[in-house]
Amino acid sequence: MSTSDPDRLVRPYLITGGRTRPVGELAIEALVETTAAARERSVTLRFERQQVVALCATPVSIAEIAAGISVPLGVAKVIVADLAADGLLTIHGTASADGPSVPLLERLLDGLSSC
């Protein structure tokens, strides 16, 4: 169900407590994974937070989380940041400040060319 769906009962600002930005900066490609604590506590989480914990059983990007729970990217970032602050998610670093390596980009280009 998308946030533009007229049947959606909860507005995005309610999900995030009115916040529009996460504490700290999160890249949309950052990989997120549940912690052991999250697997034990997931039944006590509510709605979107429980969905995020379930999605992150295997590492997924923040962009994939937003798509998976049908919320805007900013909302997903706030939820992920909150869950990480509670020790329920681990956010893995992204590429270095220098950017991705040339060999990685070449493999990516080769992969896209073969599609």
Image (tube, rainbow, N blue to C red):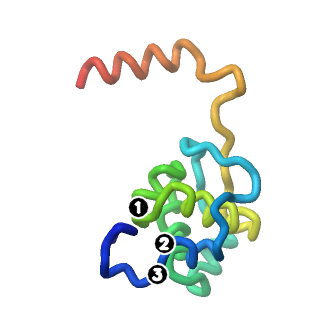
92 and 21: which one is in front?
21
Which numbered dot is residue 51? 2
Distance (Cα) linking label 3 and label 2? 15 Å
Residue at the location (49% across, 18% down)?
105
Kindly identify the amino acid type of the residue bearing the numbered disc 3.
Answer: Val
The vertical placement of 8 against 74, above or below, is below
Q: In which quarter of the image is residue 13?
A: bottom right
Residue at the location (64% across, 80% down)?
41
19 and 104: which one is in front?
19
Residue at the location (35% across, 16% down)?
110
Residue 21 in picture, x, y percent from top left: 67, 58
Q: Do the residues under discs 2 and 1 have CB atoms within 8 angstroms? A: yes
The vertical placement of 2 against 67, above or below, is below
Of the image marks 2 and 1, the number of the one nearer the N terminus: 2
Label 1 sits on residue: 68
Q: Residues within 10 Å of mark 1 (few under 14, many from 20)?
A: some
Q: Quadrant of residue 27?
A: top right
Disc 2 secondary structure class: helix
Q: Do the residues under discs 3 and 2 have CB atoms within 8 angstroms? A: no
Name the quarter where the C terminus is drawn: top left
Distance (Cα) linking label 2 and label 1? 8 Å
Residue 34 in picture, x, y percent from top left: 61, 62
Label 3 sits on residue: 10
Distance (Cα) linking label 3 and label 1? 16 Å
